[in-house]
Image (cartoon, helix red, strand yellow):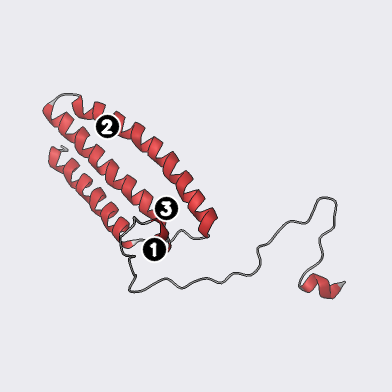
């Protein structure tokens, strides 16, 4: 038989995994997903305690949590997309310009290597045959 303690153990494990993931990762999408995992752990707690006490208050609250999480997901993913378009990285430590005035910048002890990219690939104009590149140019 599954008891309240089983639900609480699963919830604690989900929250712990989410917390460790949020604190150790730098990728904005991974951090967002870990925060969502922690939120769902809290929802499992609400449902477990509602079932234990025999009322629906916790389950109703979870419906509000799910609605807020869906809205948060849309806003957060749009924000992440705009940040990526602006800076071409999802590394959270690269966004030091977004901090408040008077707050010193956070310095990583082991920064990620900076990728150097060549020219961005682009499509040929409509109706124009693209120029061959690499091995294809040698064959022509």
Q: Is residue 73 above or below residue 54?
A: below
Q: Quadrant of residue 44?
A: top left
Q: Residue furthest front?
A: 102
**Residue 29 marker:** 3
Q: Report whether 106 appears left or right of 54.
A: right
Could you tell me which residue is drawn at 85 percent across and 58 percent down? Answer: 129
The image position of residue 127, as x and y in percent, is: 85, 51
**Residue at horizontal 16 percent and vertical 24 percent from the top:** 55
Instruction: Count every numbered label the image shows and give the total.
Output: 3
- CA gap, disc 2 and disc 3: 23 Å
Left or right position of 41 against 137: left
Q: Is residue 102 left or right of residue 75?
A: left
Residue 128 position (above or below residue 116):
above
Cα separation between marks 1 and 2: 33 Å
Tag 1–tag 2 contact (CB < 8 Å): no
Sequence-first disc among 3 and 1 = 3
Give the residue number, with chain letter if any, for mark 1: 93
Q: SS of the residue at dot 2?
A: helix
Q: Which residue is mark 2?
A: 62
Density class for disc 3 (Cα within 10 Å; few <14, some 14-19, many ≥20) is some
| Circle 1 SS class | helix
Q: Are marks 3 and 1 in contact (CB under 8 Å)?
A: no
Quadrant that contains the N terminus: top left
Q: Position of residue 64 (x, y in %)?
A: 30, 30
Q: CA distance from mark 3 to mark 1?
A: 13 Å
Q: Which residue shows up at 51% across the image and 49% down it? A: 82
Q: Nearer the viewer, residue 85 or 2?
A: 85
Residue 54: horizontal and vertical position, in percent? 14, 25
- Labels 1, 2: front one: 1
**Callout 2: few (<14), some (14-19), or many (20+) C-alpha neighbours within 10 Å?**
many
> Mark 3 or mark 2, which is nearer the start of the sequence?
3
**Res 2 quadrant in image:** top left
């Amino acid at each position: 038989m599954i008891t309240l303690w089983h639900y609480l153990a699963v919830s604690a494990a989900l929250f712990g995994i989410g917390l460790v993931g949020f604190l150790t990762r730098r990728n904005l999408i991974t951090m967002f997903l870990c925060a969502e995992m922690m939120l769902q752990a809290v929802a499992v707690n609400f449902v477990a305690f509602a079932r234990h006490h025999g009322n629906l208050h916790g389950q109703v609250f979870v419906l509000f949590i799910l609605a807020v999480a869906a809205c948060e997901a849309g806003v957060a993913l749009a924000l992440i997309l705009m940040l990526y378009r602006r800076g071409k990285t999802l590394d959270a430590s690269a966004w030091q310009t977004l901090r408040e005035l008077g707050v010193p910048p956070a310095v990583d002890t082991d920064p990620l290597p900076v990728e150097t990219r060549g020219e961005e690939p682009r499509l040929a104009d409509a109706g124009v045959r693209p120029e061959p590149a690499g091995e294809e140019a040698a064959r022509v």
